Amino acid sequence: MKKILISDHLHPAFKEGALKLGFEVDDCPHYTLEQTLKVLHNYQGLAVRTKFSVDKKVIDAGPELEFIARAGAGMDNVDEDYARRRGIACINAPEGNRDAVAEHALGMLLALMNNLSRADREVRQGIWDREGNRGMELCGRTVAIIGYGNMGRSFAQRLAGFNVNILAYDKYRHNYSDPWARQSSMEHIFETTDVLSLHIPLTAETRRLVNDDFLSGFKKPLLLLNTARGEIVDTASVLRAIDAKRITGAALDVLEVEKAAELMAQPWFKELAANPRVLLSPHVAGWSVESYRKISEVLVDKLALLGLH
């Protein structure tokens, strides 16, 4: 019987499903990296979320590993190239939280356009400023989606009822126009975009993609949404673009640094936190009550397809 080590907090649905497939499962969500390294040689499968990076050191500690299951959408904390060279299958579950990400992104966009965070604070303080909190409508605007996979397409589906012009750009897809979005060039996106939403993975190519040069290419002031990975965006560049009125508002669910103590020590953090044109959330777009379970269910389905049990 093949064995799986769960060394992170996964929904019980993963363990239940893996047991039904015939695996032996050790559910050890409180294991540290050091504890994992000590025992990984006993397992054919490793299931993780975000606790630590599954790098060469971790992979080499599991000479019998046949698969790594990452409970989430991205694989940026797994050295996929090295794992695959070792013959280890890598699976993740973007299908499990695409609905959560799409709804969160839409919620942040509507909150940003209608000043809901600021208006709420002001009313609680006895400030009744209708004119200062006048909102903007989505209807008739152009929304550009960078990255048109699970997350981007799901976001486009949610936007479809708002009578907006939805453009999509994905460097690694072909002929991906569909009923919700129209395939576009980046040149056209730079010319026409009112709202820019990022749905791309973090890679060497996308790290700090959104910088001063990138933002200066847009011909109209825009709203920026990032529910992908924080390191895709140079935060200081976003703040400069807000000051220059090239960005009229930014909704950021992810940041370059996401550990609280380190975040507060960043030179740009105080300005970011104080900026009324910025809406923040703590990397929870894909972490709904429902997606927590769905991610584990998707992983089990993919595990069954691998046929390793």
Image: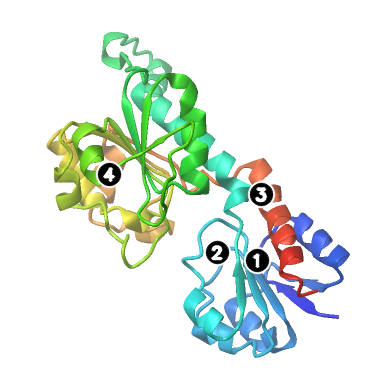
Q: Which mark is residue 8?
A: 1
Q: CA distance from mark 2 to mark 1?
A: 8 Å
Q: CA distance from mark 2 to mark 3?
A: 13 Å
Asked where in the image residue 172 lies, by quadrant, the reply is bottom left
Q: CA distance from mark 3 to mark 4?
A: 35 Å
Of tags 4 and 2, the one toward the viewer is: 4
For label 2, the residue is 50
Q: Residues within 10 Å of mark 1 (few under 14, many from 20)?
A: many
- Of 28 and 11, nearer the camera is 11
Residue 211 is situated, as x and y percent measured from the top left of the image, at 21, 53
Q: Earlier in the sequence, mark 3 or mark 4?
A: 4
Q: Which mark is residue 292?
A: 3
- Of 81 and 188, nearer the camera is 188
Going by the numbered disc 1, the residue's amino acid type is: Asp
Side of 187 relative to 175 (left or right):
left
Going by the numbered disc 4, the residue's amino acid type is: Ser
Q: Earlier in the sequence, mark 4 or mark 2?
A: 2
Quarter of the figure with the N terminus: bottom right
Mark 2 and 1 residues: CB-CB less than 8 Å, in contact?
Answer: yes
Going by the numbered disc 2, the residue's amino acid type is: Thr
Asked where in the image residue 273 lies, by quadrant, the reply is top left
Going by the numbered disc 3, the residue's amino acid type is: Tyr
For label 4, the residue is 185
Residue 307 is situated, as x and y percent measured from the top left of the image, at 76, 71
